[in-house]
Amino acid sequence: MANILVTGGAGFIGSHTCVELIKAGHKIVVLDNFVNSDVESLTRVKTICVTDFPVEKGDVLDTGFVRSLLKKHKIESVIHFAGLKAVGESVEQPLAYYNNNVVGTYSLLSAMNDAGVHKIVFSSSATVYGDPQVLPLTESHPLSATNPYGRSKLIVEDMLRDLYKSDNQWQISILRYFNPCGAHQSGLIGEDPKGIPNNLVPFVAQVASGRREKLNIWGNDYDTPDGTGVRDYIHVVDLAEGHVKALESLSVGSGCVAVNLGTGKGYSVKEVATAFGNAAGTAIPYIIANRRPGDIASCYADCSFAKEYLNWSAKRNLVDMMTDHWRWQQNNPDGYSDCTN
């Protein structure tokens, strides 16, 4: 099997993907600067998989360092998660997002080119679709962005498409995923947001555990079944398995292909809160607040291409997502922060 460099491998999706890569027989090397992640997650990946692997502390912005890593570890493919990911923060700090996400990826690609490594799976996002014109979202939907985070992902996608056009020895898989949640069934690794969670499920989890008083539901007058926003939530382990399938697809031939990873089904904010409450055995208190600027009514994927191209589809349902996320929350009420690194 292949030697894989996983950038940002200590993060939520990265750590779960490391587990699935090892399960599939791949050898991994993790590169992370640990700005928004914790090395403890990788210690636990090693526990889950009963194996060891190299962990390199560094930044994709350091082209020379990355080039040396690629050569040192005889890397054949890269899965690129490293970057900043909070929409609200991106509006407040656009330059940080363009530097980390766009310049960082440029630096990584330059290092790969120098080292003769031309296979990459890129972590993109459904934010590149902007405000949906038609649902469900297919990969052919027009691309746009409504915030610097989404725009940084779209710029990188364009960079990758241009790179392939200029040199078709590159093999590139662009994965546009929707709303990851859940956690590994062991309860050892999961989402560990810093500060106030940006995403719905970890916020609800903190309400269920008593860390936060209530959930704010931003608007209940959308054109949806219960008036609250509808999104496509996907279990992080399904998502991780999709990355393994995408990696394996790169061995088939050259190309630059974008693929949606979601469930193809939308759930409302109220449905998610109710499902989490059922998993936790407690009602989730909430209040209705005004809509947030830029929020949309519904967003969910058409995942038929993923089934056709990657032979992948999500296996886990909303109950699985909430049950596994609650197990992680119970076992790690303060995330990784109470661990000695």
Image (tube, rainbow, N blue to C red):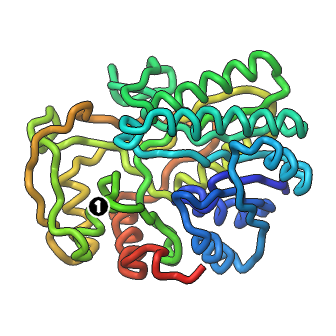
Q: Is residue 198 left or right of residue 32?
A: left
> Residue placed at 51% from the left, 39% from the top?
96
Does residue 248 appear left or right of residue 93 in this picture? right
Amino acid beneath label 1: Phe
Residue drawn 78% across the image and 41% down it: 63
Image quadrant in which the N terminus is located: bottom right
Above or below, comparing residue 49 to residue 57 in the picture: below
Could you classify mark 1 by the number of other residues whose Cα lies within 10 Å: few (under 14), some (14-19), or many (20 or more)? many
Q: Is residue 244 above or below residue 208?
A: above
| SS at badge 1 | helix
**Above-or-below relation of 256 to 248:** above
Q: Locate residue 193, reporting x and y percent.
A: 41, 61
Residue at x-position 22% and y-position 76%: 210
Give how far across and how far down residue 329 sits, in percent. Answer: 37, 74
On the rendered structure, is 221 left or right of 128?
Answer: left
Q: Could you tell me residue 119's position as x and y percent?
A: 78, 38
Q: Can residue 288 be seen in this snapshot?
A: yes
Q: Is residue 195 left or right of residue 113?
A: left
The residue that mark 1 highlights is 203
Quarter of the image where the C terminus is located: bottom right
Q: Is residue 26 above or below residue 134?
A: below
User: What count of labels does the image hold?
Assistant: 1
Q: Position of residue 276 (x, y in %)?
A: 26, 66
* Depth order, front residue of 27/338: 338
